[in-house]
């Protein structure tokens, strides 16, 4: 594998504080705006959402890839995340991104292995490792068998 990769993205300004991003070989564009709290339009992806989405998509890709390579089967996996912006000395920055993975396992015997894989994915996620803000994880693990017996719905993200 090459020791260097470049990912090119273009942004076209379509009005004050908004635009469209695109990338080569990616079929869809993404309209964006500054968030309403920074005088942007509501209802659009924001740079802040996109940063948190980068962490979430990287974590899910990393975890599922590790699970596949190690032949670890699970019933479902979703990840909820929140990025906390703070204003320090007049400058806004991400202070923390909180990851809340929700993993449903096929059997209880896989719980410890699942925790190890989640922790390994947290440490291996390229995007999270590239950021200066704090990344925290609080995982929820359920067993599909127990959900079937009790009739409880799986925990949603």
Image (cartoon, helix red, strand yellow):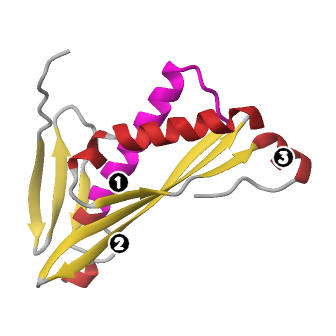
Q: Quick one: label 1 or label 3, which is nearer the N terminus?
A: 1
- Name the residue: 49% across, 32% down: 64
Would residue 56 be counted in the magenta stretch?
yes
Q: Is residue 75 above or below residue 14?
A: above
Residue receiving disc 1: 53
Q: Position of residue 17 (x, y in %)?
A: 13, 73
| Residue 13 seen in render | yes
Distance between the alpha carbons at the discs numbered 1 and 3 = 31 Å
Q: In what element is the residue under mark 3?
A: helix
Residue 48 horizontal side relative to residue 79, left or right: left
Task: From the viewer's side, name the closer residue of 146 and 109.
Answer: 109
Dot 2 surroundings within 10 Å: few (below 14), some, or many (20 or more)?
few
Would residue 55 be counted in the magenta stretch?
yes
Residue 51 horizontal side relative to residue 147, left or right: left
Distance between the alpha carbons at the discs numbered 2 and 3 = 38 Å
Q: Disc count in the image?
A: 3
| Residue 107 seen in render | no
Residue receiving disc 3: 146
Where on the picture, by quarter, is residue 48? bottom left
Residue receiving disc 2: 43
Q: In what element is the residue under mark 1?
A: helix
Dot 1 surroundings within 10 Å: few (below 14), some, or many (20 or more)?
some
Q: Is residue 4 above or below residue 18?
A: above
Task: From the viewer's side, name the closer residue of 142 and 156.
Answer: 142
Q: Quick one: label 2 or label 1, which is nearer the N terminus?
A: 2
Distance between the alpha carbons at the discs numbered 2 and 1 = 16 Å
- Name the residue: 41% across, 36% down: 61
Q: Position of residue 148 (x, y in %)?
A: 86, 45
Q: Position of residue 84 (x, y in %)?
A: 33, 71
In the image, which residues are magenta? 49-75
């Amino acid at each position: 594998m090459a020791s260097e990769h470049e990912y090119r993205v273009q942004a076209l300004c379509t009005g004050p504080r908004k635009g469209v991003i695109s990338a080569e070989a990616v079929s869809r564009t993404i309209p964006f705006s500054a968030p309403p709290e920074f005088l942007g339009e509501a209802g659009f992806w924001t740079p802040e959402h996109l940063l948190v989405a980068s962490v979430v998509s990287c974590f899910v890709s990393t975890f599922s890839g590790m699970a596949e390579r190690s032949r670890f089967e699970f019933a479902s996996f979703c990840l909820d995340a929140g990025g906390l912006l703070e204003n320090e000395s007049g400058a806004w920055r991400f202070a923390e991104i909180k990851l809340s993975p929700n993993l449903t396992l096929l059997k209880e015997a896989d719980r410890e292995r699942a925790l190890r894989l989640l922790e390994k994915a947290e440490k291996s996620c390229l995007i999270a490792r590239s950021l200066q803000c704090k990344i925290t994880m609080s995982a929820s693990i359920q067993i599909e068998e127990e959900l079937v017996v009790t009739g409880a719905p799986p925990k949603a993200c």
